[in-house]
Image (cartoon, rainbow, N blue to C red):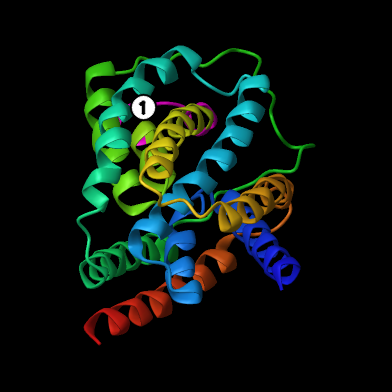
Amino acid sequence: MFILQFFFLFLFGTLVGTCGTMLGVGGGFIHVPFLMLAFNFIPQDAIGTSIGIIFFNTLAGATIYYFKKQMDFELAKKLSLATIPGALLGPFIVQRYTHSFFSICLTLMLLLVSYTLYFKKEKKSFNKKNEVKEEVEEEYAVNVPLGFIGTIVIGFLSNLFGIGGGIIHVPFLIIMLKMPVHIALGTSHLILCVSSFLGTLMFLYLGNVQVDFMMPIALGSIIGARVGAELSQQISSNMIQKILAVTLVFVAIKLLFNALM
């Protein structure tokens, strides 16, 4: 039974890691409702376990981006400090959740994510033969105080919902801080890696991390991230976005139904 469960969770992690990487949204917003609906996790355990999974996923991603030099390491170090309040205080706030209250809040968040995914424009990809290689390093100026404020808010949200925050943080870095897309992805990974690491320690202290569920999903998500990175260059993500968006709507309805009942 344990082996079957491990294999099932590993496949789930691989699938979520693959789709999340292809769409650039991560998988935290899938982990939490999955654990609550499939295994009857209480919100606190679902959130804590999800944050642990996200730590391993972002650690692997941040390492890859660092060696590819697709990261503003100095900025990431500064903004990582802004995640500390959310990582340390968020888990204690989570302890106050009731199942119905959190289910309703999570439902609203899933509907918002679903809407964003469904109407998100597909990124254009170019064949390597037609790709223009730019050797000149892009220059940009970052409003660090604004970055601190935004990262503090996102740090709280990521630990309050167990979503990691990448789906919010990456657009924030690109739109508000005017960072190049490829640099924003790597920078966000390192910042969220620090946030999820601290959050995982706090949730472990509070007894809200189910390690036997966390590890197989985390291992699968790491492999899925590598697969997704390769497939993103070959497969159109438009249809995957829409399928995932519709699926999330059904998940949100199921969560809301459970909360009302």
Residue 133 picture location, percent across and down: 69, 24
Point 30% across, 31% down: residue: 151
Q: Is residue 161 left or right of residue 67?
A: left
- Which of the pair 231/162 is nearer the observer? 162
- Outermost bottom residue: 261
Residue 9 picture location, percent across and down: 64, 64
Mark 1 crowd level (few <14, some 14–19, many ≥20, 10 Å Cα)? some
Residue 178 picture location, percent across and down: 36, 27
Point 51% across, 26% down: residue: 183
Give SS at disc 1.
loop
Residue 232 visible here: no
- Outermost right residue: 129
Which segment did they paint magenta? 175-185
Q: Is residue 105 magenta?
A: no
Q: Is residue 220 left or right of residue 30?
A: right
Q: Is residue 8 left or right of residue 187?
A: right
Magenta stretch, main secondary structure, is helix
Q: Is residue 34 left or right of residue 136?
A: left
Which quarter of the figure is the C terminus placed in? bottom left
Residue 98 visible here: yes
- Which of the pair 252/113 is nearer the observer? 252
- Which of the pair 169/171 is nearer the observer? 169
Q: Which residue is mark 1?
A: 178
- Which of the pair 217/39 is nearer the observer? 39
Please, is residue 245 above or below residue 215 in the view?
below
Residue 106 picture location, percent across and down: 30, 64
Please, is residue 248 above or below residue 159 in the view?
below
